[in-house]
Image (cartoon, grey):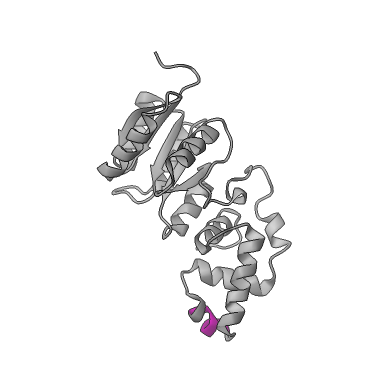
Amino acid sequence: MTSNSTVRVLIVDDHEVVRTGLRTIISLHDSIEVVGEATNGHSAIDQCAAVRPNLVLMDMKMPGMDGPTTIARMRALFPGLKILVLTAFDEPQLVGRALAAGAVGYLLKDTEEDELIAAIQLAAAGYGAGAPATSPSLVKDSREAPGEEYRASVTAREMDVLRLVASGLTNPQISKRLSISVSTVNHHVHNLLNKLGAKTRTEAVAIALREGLVDL
């Protein structure tokens, strides 16, 4: 019989190799149990009702209904459910939507085994969780006033740059759009990463989306 302290995990990903890899890793840890798998959002919701997981590992790009939409519906149906996003570096817009929909954090798909297990345990316990590539500020307590601390430190010009970064423009493209040098853009991006507590542009955009600093 499963212990009350065991984390019951549902894996949602349309790639069998990903599900198999996650299941194999999780099976090595007695405190975590895979109780179901799903290949799309609709199936994931059905599985949640059937197996009642504590936590869902959720892919972002799936046929039929994407990760953020699925997360929003899951959170409405199962308010206590914890959801961790599985993402690639090229999905900042989806990550931002997923966090806004109620995900507690995100993990890169190449996360190391020990980082994955630690993130699952933290998230299941009610804490924000994420791999080292995830800034702590990205998974902070959602009860804090959205965006307030960032708006106080980010300048108007940095906000201009941030909006263009979020829209997918490269630094040279931003340079042309704002009629400033590439080195100046680089400087603004560097400052933004520091102020947002992000290590990459992807993280910076995800944080900005979640905090309502930018819209897509």
Residue 42 magenta:
no
Residue at the image point whose x is 44% and y is 54% from the top: 94
User: Can you tell which quarter of the image residue 27 is in?
Assistant: top left
Residue 45: x %, y % from top left: 36, 35
Residue 136: x %, y % from top left: 61, 48
Q: Is residue 102 left or right of residue 68?
A: right
User: Can you tell which quarter of the image residue 74 is in?
Assistant: top left
Residue 177 magenta:
yes
Near-viewer residue (191 or 113):
113
Residue 96: x %, y % from top left: 50, 54
Q: Is residue 159 left or right of residue 205?
A: right
Residue at the image point whose x is 65% and y is 75% from the top: 157
- Residue extent of the magenta highlight: 173-178
User: Can you tell which quarter of the image residue 209 is in?
Assistant: bottom right
Query: Does 96 appear above or below 117?
Result: below
Residue at the image point whose x is 70% and y is 55% from the top: 148
Q: Is residue 13 left or right of residue 76?
A: left
